Amino acid sequence: MARLTSIVLMAVLAATTANGREVTVASWNLENLTVASKDKDFSLLAKYAKTLDADVIALQEVEGEEVLARVFDQAEYSFFLSSRKHTQRTAVAVRSGIAVEQQADLDSLNTTGRQRHGVDIEISIDGADIRLLAVHLKSFCFQAPLPTPDPKGNHCEKLATQVPLIEDWIDRMASAGTPFIVLGDFNRRLNLPNDAFWDEVNDGDPKGLKLFRATAGSVPGCWNSEYKEFIDHIVYDDQVREWVVSGSFEELVYAEETGKKAALSDHCPIAVTLDVQ
């Protein structure tokens, strides 16, 4: 059986409670999941997808619907993929029965011509509309200071070109009063004190805006805690925070030994449950 860090799965997806409807939101980087993948154990990945049992899953490094259908049951999920023509695409899988409207990609995140688009969707849960932006940002600038943005520069200079674009999307949602979640592989240790990325997006502007990280206060257990800080995150505003079920953040840790990493992924899924009012 898979080991879950922090707690056992809180609830069956889309369960109706006395107060609202519980929905689990997750992120999972599937590490180069392509139709041609020869090292992937699709049966094992599908087993973990069933164990995760989330309603909305932001996905990274996936080629397309064909390969996603080998991991997620198409009778249960619809797939919303970025328009980028590449084997490493961002996507969102959404449980059947949840109303979804896909927005235009946040393709401006492709500041260098080699970066991933953000997938922007709106979901409706019992009359509540929530915007979700699924991202996979520039790698290899995990905690260094952010320099002057330069799309032709080093890793951190390239990441610095994406930060204001994420901030602008957040500010637009906040200004409109729209509850929102930004989730995925940030390739950044946002939980470290005084992180420059986090400080820039969580700057109180528009007035009163405050962001929260589902990963805050938690330590990764993936692959025997090989990674000491999360780089995958689920970030949300104070409206969504009101719906977060206390203690529901979890990381689904693979039971297999590290020799199976290539067959699965170097990332473990993370999730949080919302009780949407």
Image (cartoon, grey):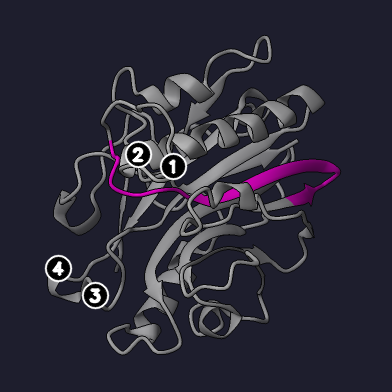
Q: Tell me the crowding category of disc 4: few under 14, some 14 to 19, or many 20 or more residues within 10 angstroms, Cα based.
A: some
**Residue picked out by circle 1:** 233
The image's mark for residue 258 is 4
Q: Quadrant of residue 19?
A: top right
Instruction: Say which label, 4 or 2, has the lower sequence index.
Output: 2
SS type, badge 3: loop
Q: Is residue 272 visible?
A: no
Q: Is residue 130 magenta?
A: yes
Residue at 62% x, 47% y is 108
Report, in whole angstroms, how far the alpha carbon at label 3 lies from the one at label 1: 22 Å
The image's mark for residue 77 is none
SS type, badge 2: loop
Q: Which residues are magenta?
A: 122-142
Q: Tell me the crowding category of disc 3: few under 14, some 14 to 19, or many 20 or more residues within 10 angstroms, Cα based.
A: some
Report, in whole angstroms, how far the alpha carbon at label 4 lies from the one at label 2: 23 Å
Q: Amino acid at mark 2?
A: Arg
SS type, badge 4: helix
* Viewer-side label of 4, 2: 2
Report, in whole angstroms, how far the alpha carbon at label 1 lies from the one at label 4: 23 Å
Quadrant occupied by the C terminus: top right
* Viewer-side label of 3, 4: 3
Q: Is residue 180 magenta?
A: no
Picture coordinates of residue 40 (x, y %)? Answer: 32, 83
